[in-house]
Structures are given as structure tokens and as C-alpha cells.
Amino acid sequence: MAKRSTHFVCQTCGATAPKWTGKCESCGAWNSYVEETAGSGIGGAIIGQKGRPMRKGRVVPLVALSGEIDQAPRVATGIAELDRVTGGGFVRGSALLVGGDPGIGKSTLLIQAAATLARLGARVVYVSGEEAVAQVRLRAERLGLADAPVALAAETSVEDILTTLADGPAPHLVIIDSIQTLWTEVVDSAPGTVAQVRTSAQAMIRYAKESGATVVLVGHVTKEGTIAGPRVVEHMVDAVLYFEGDGARHFRVLRAVKNRFGPTDEIGVFEMTGRGLKEVPNPSELFMGTRDASSPGAAVFAGMEGTRPVLVEVQALVAPSSLGTPRRAVVGWDGNRLSMILAVLEAHCGIRFGQHDVYLNVAGGLRIQEPAADLAVAASLVSSLAGVALGPDCVYFGEVSLSGAVRPVAHAASRLKEAEKLGFSRAVAPKGGPGEDSLTAIRVGEVMELADLVARIAGGSRPRVTAAEPRAVRA
């Protein structure tokens, strides 16, 4: 009997090696290699299982580059925040990957979307690989969705799932919870391995393209905050959504990091209640609801999340350190960018942080990714070090360069309109922001250098406002 060849596959990045090693040379993960057969690893679907020859292909029709384009029809979920993130609803024949920490509310959100679509007349199939049918029914009863005509099953075999879906009319939406629990007989490895996750996801995506149904795959998240399994799965699907939030807080953020049929970096905000997830149409009010404007080290940042302006409070604490190496702790922002702001303040503004611990936090648990928060972070750091509270009616936004200059950012008009709607009357922003004309009643204090703003905050005075009357602001 011929000996079956094996190799080792990294369960983090999918890299292969002829023998086991403690550390993956591709991604640097430790103890991530698992032994698999040669026909079941990466490329196993191409060479065939157990050395079977490839079947003869068929002729694929070639068409011209010009021609009529059929717009991909969408299925609105009925949940406005979910439709915002997906770009207007689920696209027929697409595959989505939803990731998030355990217990964050992924299953709750999807079962609410499934029940809403089913009540609108769509055929929805919910396949649970982690919970029994009784457990899913208990959740639906708690959420008040038990009367929704959702087809429910508890199964992990890909072959059985595809056979069940083929028996009857094609569904409009198929939810698989989760992709790490699926297994197929084509691959000789345990569920959750790279080969099983990749092959199972490929089979479900192929079904979505052939049947026109929307397939939603739920993925676990690792300690680093990324979806577990091979990264190739994220490239296979049409959209990747991350469900973020702190279990101790009552709101959740759904963020789109990839979307072939809509905008990326769009967010949807939900509030976790006893009856499930509730939409938050104005997240700025939620993030600013418990703000203490009299404390030093707090600055309001007018940011953009996709197409939506969001106001959030940036909190900083600068305290004397008793350690040889002061602490630098960041929650909700990039730690490397904080180091850059500290270096600019020391080099161009004469402020020394070498003997102080620096703690930075974005209130509410929201994670900021745009560089426009540089000015708000710098203002909060100087305010905490000087012990001077910033103006309670002022917002900040602007990008700080390494030379100490404050650079303009996009969508200035949208940021100012959102601030005006929440009762703010002043703003500190870069000079000469580009964009379309839009009248606003907010007085804008234009700054060109970070040192000018720092001098006024350290002196206990408010930033100077150059335009006392409403002016045209371009974003």
C-alpha cells in the first residue's frame, strides 16, 4: 500500500511546511502547524483528493467588454443600521463574513435580520453548528421572534446542508453559524482547521453564486481581534463585517472593512437591550450622553465613520511616573500615532512627557481610525498636563504633521453640521479646509501650527476664533 504524503499547515495564515516547526516563518505564530494530508491542504481542491486526476474542463463562453450591465438586486433587511453597513441591503448571490468576540451579539443580530426578512415574505434558512435547535428557539422566544417563519436546523456537515438547501425552493438568505464548525468529507482533517474552513467556505460560496441566495457566514475572532482561520476566506467572500463592542457596555458597533457592493469603513450602531439589539440612529448623542465638560484632559472630536459624522470624547490622563520607563496606554486609538503626537509636542512645542505616564481613551468604546483625531488628542494631552479644562462648547479635528503643522481634512462641513446639531458653538480646525460651500453658525478657530493652540490651552485661555460671524465652510 502506497504511503500517503503529509505536510504541515499553519492554522493562522495557511502557510505550508514539509515538517513541523514551532514558529511559522510567514506570520510568526507559535505552535500553529497541524499535520494534514497532501490532498487536503491548500490546493487540495485542485490536485484532487487521494491522487485523483483532474476532470476535463468545459469551454467557458467569452463575451465582449461592452454590453448591458445588470444591476445586482438587493434585499433590504428592514434593519436600517444593517442596511447602511451593507450598502443598502443584502445582494443576491453574495457571501458575507461576520466576525466578532464571543457573546458580542452576532447571533442575536442575524436572527433578528432573519426574522424581519421572513416576516416580509422571504425564505430564510438558519443553520446553527454551535447550538441545538432548542437553544436557538429559546433565544428567539426571548427576543419575541418565535412567530417568524424562519427555517431552522442544527447541522455541521456541508454535504447535508447543501442537500437540504437543494430540496425545495431556493432560499433568499442562508445563515451559517459558524463557519469554524462545518466539516466536509472531501478533507481529512478536524473541523476548524485551515483545510476544512477553506473548503467549507468555498462550497457555500459556490452555492450562493449558483442559486442566487445570500449566504452569511459567522466567524470567530482571535485574541488579536481578527477572524480566526485562514485569511484567504476574507478574500473569497464579497463583504467582511466586524461586530465590535465591550461586553460591559450596552452598545455595539457593526463595521464594514470590505464590501464589493458598497462603501467600506461604514458603521452601524446598536444598543443591546433585554429585547435584543436596538438601532441607534444618532450615535453622537449616545457617545456624548454622559460627558463631563469640566474635567481637564477631555476634548470632543468631530470624526467621520464612512459617510456618517460622529462626535466622540477623547480622554487623556498625564500623571507623574515613578518608573524608569513611563507607561503609554491607549484604548480606542493607534498607539503608534500617540507616540508620534507626543514626539511632535516635545520637539515643536517644548512640552516634555518623559517623566509622565500617558493614558488615552476614546469614551464609549468606539475605535477611531482616521488621522483627523490628531488635533483632539493633542488638545486633550495638553489640557491634562496643564490642568486646564477645555471649552465645553468646542470640537476639534485636524491632522498633525511631523513638522508641527495642522493639515486640513475632508468633510469639514459634515463634521461642523453634526456639532451644531448637538449644541456646540465653536470649533478648532485647520485653516483652509477644502470642500463644498455650506453655511454653518459655528465659529471656527483656524489654526496653522500646533504650538499656537498649545500656548492658549496652557495659558488657560480659549483658542482664538478668527471668524465671529457664520461663514462658508467647505468640506
Image: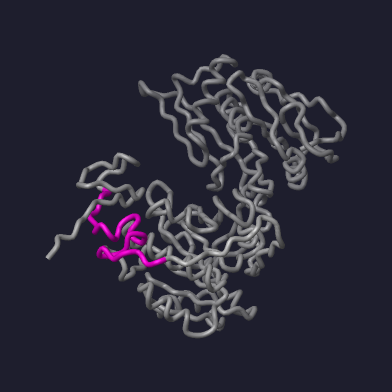
Q: Position of residue 432 (x, y in %)?
A: 77, 27
Residue 186 located left or right of residue 226: left
Q: Quadrant of residue 413?
A: top right
Image point 49% across, 59% down: which residue?
Answer: 98
Q: Quadrant of residue 411?
A: top right
102 or 307, which is in the foreground?
307
For the N terminus, give its image quadrant: bottom left
In the displayed structure, does residue 103 sit left or right of residue 429?
A: left
Q: Quadrant of the C terminus?
A: top right
Q: Is residue 262 above or below residue 297?
A: below
**Which residue corresponds to the image point at 38% horizontal and 53% vertical from the top-left?**
230
- Residue 43 highlighted magenta (yes or no): yes
Q: Nearer the viewer, residue 39 or 87?
A: 39
**In the visual, does 361 lie left or right of 191?**
right
Q: Which residues are magenta?
A: 32-56
Residue drawn at x 22%, y 47% as measured from the top left: 18
Q: Residue at x 49, y 63 (%)?
A: 106
Q: Where residue 318 sits: x, y (%)?
A: 50, 28
The reply, left or right, for residue 80 in relation to residue 142 is right
